[in-house]
Structures are given as structure tokens and as C-alpha cells.
Amino acid sequence: QVQVVESGGGLVQAGDSLRISCAASGRTLRYYTMGWFRQAPGKEREFVASITWNGGSTRYADSVKGRFTISRDNAKNTVYLQMISLKPEDTAVYYCAVPKTWYGGTYYKIEDYDYWGQGTQVTVSS
């Protein structure tokens, strides 16, 4: 059983930067694509970014392209999301997710992921 735990969220001001992390236990992440999603109040969960098992490919939602960077440290079994130039519309609970299959591509659909963390709150004030 995979357990995924996000951390690093908080309250920041518009224009600030923040890095959130995702650590996993129960399975090494080095063979899996990893994804970040977010869900704002009253809205559906949406894709933010994903990275392949070796970090060779990444994919971003248009709304965060150029501001967010996904990266991974397989030795630490951890994935990161570096966020700069944050906007109030980035306010959401951010979730880390792991798919069931190995060596996948840069998945961006919720149904491609099987294991989810509890999320970390990011709030951006104007």
C-alpha cells in the first residue's frame, strides 16, 4: 500500500514563492510518474503538473506554465512543486498522486492516478 504525504503549504502574499513537497512510503517512487493536482473551494480537482519516473519529461497546466516547476529526488523518494509569482487564483488544496503503472508518461487525467495524499493548503492573499 502506498502512502503519500504532502507538506509545505501555507499562507503567502501575491507574488511570493513557495515550495511544496510530496513524500511516499510503502513503495519506491523511482519507477513512477508523479503528479500534482489542486482543488479550489467549489471547483473540481484539476491537473497542475506531472513528471516522468526519471525526470526526463514534464507537463504543466497552461495556468501555471512558466511559474511552477515540478522536480523529483528519487534518492529521497520525494517530489517537489516550486511555485513562483503566486496569484490569488492559485489558492487551493494541492494533492500529490501516484499512478498504478510503472514507467508511465506525463499523465494529466485524474483517472490515471490511483494513490492520493490528503493535500496541503496553499493560500495566496492579494
Image (cartoon, grey):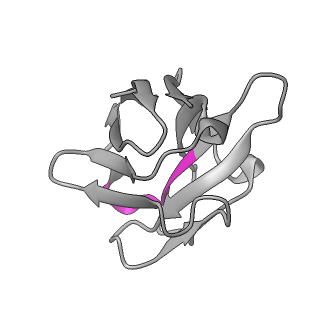
Residue at image coords 82%, 35%: 44
Counting labels gives 0
Q: Residue at x 56, y 72 (%)?
A: 105
Measured along the vertical axis of the image, is residue 3 above or below residue 21? above
Q: Residue at x 58, y 66 (%)?
A: 60
Q: Image point 61% across, 36% down: which residue?
A: 88
Residue 43 in the image, given as x and y percentages of width and height: 83, 31
Q: Position of residue 117 (x, y in %)?
A: 51, 27
Q: Nearer the viewer, residue 23 or 102?
A: 23
Residue 32 found in image quarter: bottom left
Q: Quadrant of residue 39?
A: top right
Question: Quick check: is 60 in the magenta stretch?
Answer: no
* 49 lies left or right of 23: right
Quadrant holding the C terminus: top right
Residue toward you, 72 or 41? 41
At which x and y percent is residue 102? Answer: 49, 62
Would you identify the image quadrant in which residue 9 lies? top left
Judge by depth and name the residue closer to the eye, 91 or 93: 91
Q: Is residue 32 above or below residue 93?
A: below
Q: Position of residue 64 (x, y in %)?
A: 58, 59
Which residue is at the far left? 75
- Highlighted magenta segment, given as a residue range: 30-36
